[in-house]
Image: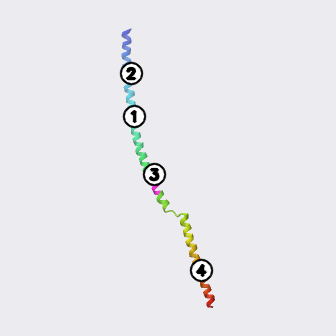
């Protein structure tokens, strides 16, 4: 019986060795796939980061060109000043005309 148990032990170790080799090969393939996927994702993230950066710059530039409330208030104040000056000139001209009649 001892010879038979030794033969079984040798047979098991042979199968176990091949099974371990196959498992290691599969794990190596999975690790390689993970590395390639991670590298691809890193490149994608870098590309998207650059695109977002460009969009942020574009938005900042466009915001600088917006017609803001402050601009509108300034333009309305200028318009009101011009209207006031014209009204004053008209009044002066009407008074001069009445005096000269």
- Quadrant location of the C terminus? bottom right
Name the residue carrying label 4: 88
Q: Are marks 2 and 4 in contact (CB under 8 Å)?
A: no
Looking at marks 3 and 2 on the same chain, the residue that comes earlier in the sequence is marked by: 2
Residue 8 x, y percent position in the rendering: 38, 14
- Picture quadrant where residue 72 is located: bottom right
Q: Do the residues labelled 4 and 1 touch (CB within 8 Å)?
A: no
- Residue at the far bottom: name it: 101
Q: What stretch is highlighted in magenta?
A: 51-58
Q: What is the CA distance from the residue labelled 3 to the residue labelled 2?
A: 53 Å
Q: What is the CA distance from the residue labelled 4 to the residue labelled 1?
A: 86 Å
Seen at 59% across and 85% down, the residue is 93
- Picture quadrant where residue 86 is located: bottom right
Residue 16 x, y percent position in the rendering: 38, 21
Q: Judge from the rendering whether residue 15 lies leftward or rightward of residue 69; answer left or right.
A: left
Find numbered disc 1 in the image and state the secondary structure of the residue it sits on.
helix
Q: Do the residues labelled 1 and 2 touch (CB within 8 Å)?
A: no
Find numbered disc 3 in the image and state the secondary structure of the residue it sits on.
helix
Mark 2 Cα within 10 Å, few/some/many (few <14, many 20+)?
A: few
Disc number placed over residue 52 in the picture, else none: 3
Name the residue carrying label 2: 16
Residue 94 x, y percent position in the rendering: 61, 85
Residue 92 x, y percent position in the rendering: 60, 83
Looking at marks 2 and 4 on the same chain, the residue that comes earlier in the sequence is marked by: 2
Callout in the foreground (2, 4): 4
Seen at 62% across and 89% down, the residue is 99
- Quadrant location of the N terminus? top left
- Please tell me which residue lies in front, 87 or 21: 87
């Amino acid at each position: 019986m001892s010879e038979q148990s030794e033969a079984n032990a040798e047979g098991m170790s042979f199968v176990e060795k091949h099974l371990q080799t196959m498992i290691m090969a599969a794990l190596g393939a999975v690790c390689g796939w993970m590395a390639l996927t991670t590298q691809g994702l890193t490149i994608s993230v870098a590309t998207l980061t650059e695109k977002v950066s460009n969009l942020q710059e574009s938005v900042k530039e466009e915001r600088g060109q917006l017609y803001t409330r402050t601009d509108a208030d300034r333009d309305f104040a200028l318009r009101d000043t011009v209207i006031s000056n014209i009204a004053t000139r008209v009044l002066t001209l009407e008074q001069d005309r009445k005096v000269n009649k």
